[in-house]
Image (tube, grey):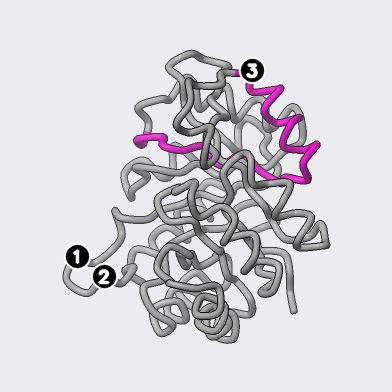
């Protein structure tokens, strides 16, 4: 079973939500495999139900499964670690404080485990208080360099920068991208990304020298009638990924 995402030109892998097993398969094919499909732990009442269902997603996508929290819900952190331990997916979403637990329970270093940090309004600094208890406490604002090195200490692979609100925090995001490039860490921009700002967001990370980028594009490409991620939009995003890497 392949444990690492299939990056386009070893650089970019798309992350979208899978509404169903059929939708996951269609998106996987539309992205020519350069994708991980998000399935949210929050949608399941038990570990067993989540594991049984997510195995079906793994089967149709060559294990391109991204185990999600559910809108960054810190209360899902422990469930994500438990089910990821069994599933061994290619990608795991975690709050900052859940990274060490997930990596230890996975028992290997290949699966991508991100750590959620948030913008602060201050360039060069991020909020790392994104865990079940810490999210309710005053912000823990640290230099982005420190956040990256703390995540590395815990076995993390990448910064999940959320909520970006598209390019509302552009200067902050540019600094995060520069730090990821400088300190050899992957980057996952998340929140408010759409077909209009996707290419610019990617280009900022590429120009900053980020080795691997996993952009999350969620609600903006979901069909509101069916709940499905639109495969035609996935194809457009793949073309944009190719454009940025030319």
Q: Nearer the viewer, residue 37 or 103?
A: 103
The residue most toward the left is 225
Q: Which residue is mark 1?
A: 224
Marks 1 and 2, Cα distance to the nearest angstrom?
5 Å
Question: Which residues are the magenta region?
Answer: 142-166
Q: Is residue 152 magenta?
A: yes
Marks 1 and 3, Cα distance to the nearest angstrom?
39 Å
Q: Which tag, 1 or 3, sits closer to the chain's start?
A: 3
User: In the displayed structure, would residue 37 be above or below residue 208?
Assistant: below
> Residue 137 at x, y = what percent?
48, 26
Q: Nearer the viewer, residue 65 or 183?
A: 65
Q: Residue at x 49, y 31 (%)?
A: 118
Q: Where's the N terminus, which quadrant?
A: bottom right
Left or right of residue 10, residue 238 in this image? left
Q: Which tag, 2 or 3, sits closer to the chain's start?
A: 3
Q: Is residue 216 magenta?
A: no
The dot on residue 227 is: 2
Query: Is there a contact, CB below 8 Å, between mark 2 and mark 3?
Result: no
* Helix, strand or loop for disc 3: strand
Query: Is there a contact, CB below 8 Å, between mark 1 and mark 3?
Result: no
Q: Which residue is mark 3?
A: 143
* Helix, strand or loop for disc 1: loop
User: In the displayed structure, would residue 29 be above or below residue 106?
Assistant: below
* Helix, strand or loop for disc 2: loop
> Residue 135 at x, y = what percent?
48, 33
Q: Residue at x 41, y 37 (%)?
A: 163
The residue most toward the top is 122
Crowding at dot 1, Cα within 10 Å, few <14 / some 14-19 / many 20+, comes out as few
> Residue 136 at x, y = what percent?
45, 31
Query: Is there a contact, CB below 8 Å, between mark 1 and mark 2?
Result: yes
Crowding at dot 3, Cα within 10 Å, few <14 / some 14-19 / many 20+, comes out as some
Left or right of residue 153, residue 147 in this image? left
């Amino acid at each position: 079973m392949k444990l690492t995402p299939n990056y386009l030109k070893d650089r970019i892998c798309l992350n979208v939500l899978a509404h169903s097993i059929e939708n996951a398969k269609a998106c996987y094919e539309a992205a020519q495999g350069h994708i991980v499909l998000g399935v949210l732990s929050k949608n399941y009442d038990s570990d067993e139900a989540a594991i049984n269902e997510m195995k079906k997603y793994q089967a149709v996508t060559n294990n391109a499964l991204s185990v999600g929290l559910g809108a960054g819900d810190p209360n899902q952190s422990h469930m994500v670690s438990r089910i990821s331990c069994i599933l061994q997916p290619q990608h795991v979403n975690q709050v900052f404080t859940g990274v060490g637990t997930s990596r230890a329970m996975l028992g290997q270093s290949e699966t991508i485990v991100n750590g959620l940090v948030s913008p602060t309004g201050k360039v060069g600094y991020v909020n790392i208080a994104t865990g079940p208890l810490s999210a309710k406490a005053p912000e823990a604002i640290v230099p982005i360099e420190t956040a990256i090195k703390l995540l590395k200490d815990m076995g993390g692979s990448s910064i999940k920068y959320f909520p970006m609100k598209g390019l509302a925090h552009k200067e902050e995001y540019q600094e995060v991208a520069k730090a990821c490039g400088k300190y050899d860490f992957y980057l996952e921009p998340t929140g408010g990304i759409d077909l209009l700002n996707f290419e610019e967001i990617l280009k900022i990370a590429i120009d900053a020298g980020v080795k691997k980028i996993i952009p999350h594009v969620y609600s903006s490409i979901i069909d509101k009638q069916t709940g499905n991620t639109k495969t035609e939009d996935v194809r457009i995003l793949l073309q944009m990924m190719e454009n940025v890497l030319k």
